[in-house]
Image (cartoon, rainbow, N blue to C red):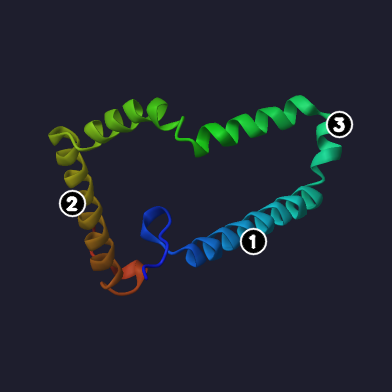
């Protein structure tokens, strides 16, 4: 005899186990949301300032839903192009070289001895 197969090729008993697990997961999620609402005192906050709660919920939904990325993408792209342009890379290289030269000069003058006996500067 063949066993009865349900959706996706699973046996009937396995489908029952999955359904039970999903029910338990749903119950745990509802309990977690209820605990969070109690901790944040959402009912009181919604009664006092419903527009603020609505604004926070809308902002969180927009950020979590990826609504901010289309607005930021052109700015990120423009900043990356500007930072990686050949002119800026050359300027950054020159700045790093100047900082290294200044540090080497400071190290050399610090190793010359007491402060009063160092050789005169040729600047």
Residue displayed at 70% across by 28% down: 54
Tell me which label, 1 or 2, sits earlier in the chain: 1
Q: Position of residue 20 (x, y in %)?
A: 60, 62
Which label lies toward us, 1 or 2?
1
Left or right: 49 with respect to 3?
Answer: right
- Residue 26 in the image: above or below residue 118: above
Left or right: 46 with respect to 61?
Answer: right
Would you identify the image quadrant in which residue 115 lies?
Answer: bottom left
Residue 24, label in figure: 1
Secondary structure under tag 2 reads helix
The residue nearer to you, when weighing 78 against 36, is 36
Left or right: 48 with respect to 27?
Answer: right
Residue displayed at 71% across by 50% down: 33
Q: Do callouts 1 and 2 mark residues in contact (Cβ within 8 Å)?
A: no
The residue nearer to you, when weighing 83 against 60, is 60
Residue displayed at 26% across by 35% down: 80
Left or right: 114 with respect to 99?
Answer: right
The residue nearer to you, when weighing 106 against 27, is 27
Answer few, some or many: residues within 10 Å of disc 1's Cα (few below 14, many 20 plus, some between 14 and 19).
few
Q: Position of residue 29 (x, y in %)?
A: 65, 54
Residue displayed at 23% across by 67% down: 108
Residue 97, label in figure: 2
The CA distance from mark 1 to mark 2 is 63 Å
Residue where numbered disc 3 is placed = 47
């Amino acid at each position: 005899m063949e066993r009865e197969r349900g959706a996706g090729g699973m046996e009937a008993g396995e489908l029952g186990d999955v359904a039970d697990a999903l029910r338990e997961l749903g119950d745990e999620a509802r309990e977690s949301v209820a605990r969070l609402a109690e901790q944040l005192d959402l009912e009181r906050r919604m009664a006092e300032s419903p527009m603020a709660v609505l604004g926070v919920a809308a902002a969180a939904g927009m950020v979590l839903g990826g609504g901010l990325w289309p607005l930021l993408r052109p700015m990120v792209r423009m900043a990356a192009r500007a930072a990686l342009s050949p002119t800026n890379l050359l300027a950054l290289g020159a700045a790093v070289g100047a900082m290294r030269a200044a540090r080497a000069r400071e190290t050399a003058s610090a190793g010359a001895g007491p402060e009063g006996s160092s050789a005169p500067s040729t600047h």
